[in-house]
Amino acid sequence: QVQLVESRGGLVQPGGSLRLSCAASRMVFSIYTMGWYRQAPGKQRELVSTMTSNGITNYADSVKGRFTISRDSAKNTVYLQMNSLKPEDTAVYYCNAYRTASGYEYDYWGQGTQVTVSS
């Protein structure tokens, strides 16, 4: 069973920074697209950022220039560095691992971690 374990989020002041990490286990980390999604109260889950197995990144327009995704295959870990945080970044953040093979989808989620941006 694939496991994705996110680091604890927290309360951050507007303009502050926070780094999330997600440790993956029981999977071949290097072949998955790893991503971060978030869900604010009353809203649908939305994409924040993804990084493919060969390092291609994608960001939501709302976080471009402020958030950076990275991955460390030696540690089977994906990171999300969040800078210049805004109150609207408040959400539960979820780690995701995804790949397709032979017509099958492999789609795994972490348990989520709360990030609150408030003064």
Image (cartoon, rainbow, N blue to C red):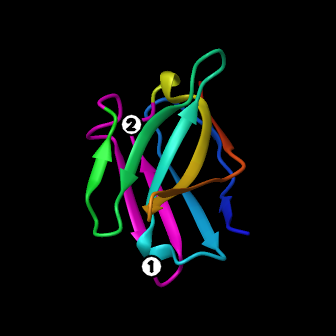
Q: Is residue 72 magenta?
A: yes
Residue 7 visible: yes
Q: Residue at (32%, 41%) from the top-left corner?
A: 59
What residue is rendered at 46% in x and 52% in y? 35
- Find the residue positioned furthest to the bottom: 74
Residue 98: x and y in percent read 49, 57
Residue 113 sits above or below residue 30 on the image: above
The residue drawn where x is 28% and y is 54% is 57
Q: For the C terminus, which image quadrant?
A: top right
Q: Taking 72 as reference, is 51 left or right? A: left
Do the numbered discs 2 and 1 sit on residues whose CB atoms are within 8 Å? no
Q: The residue under label 1 is which amino acid type?
A: Ser
Image quadrant in which the N terminus is located: bottom right
**Label 2 residue SS:** loop
- x and y percent of residue 99 in the render? 46, 60
Q: Which residue is mark 1?
A: 73
Query: Which quadrant of the structure image shows residue 33?
Result: bottom left
In this picture, is 88 found above or below 16? Answer: above
- Residue that mark 2 sits on: 84
Q: Is residue 72 visible?
A: no
Residue at image point 43% right, 76% down: 30
- Measured Cα–Cα span from mark 2 to mark 1: 27 Å
Q: Position of residue 58 (x, y in %)?
A: 30, 46
Q: Could you tell me the amino acid type at mark 2?
A: Ser
Asked if residue 90 is among those painted magenta in the image, a careful observer would answer: no
Residue 68's place in the image compared with 2, above or below, is above
Q: Is residue 60 left or right of residue 105?
A: left
Magenta stretch in the rendered image: 61-85
Total number of numbered discs in the rendering: 2
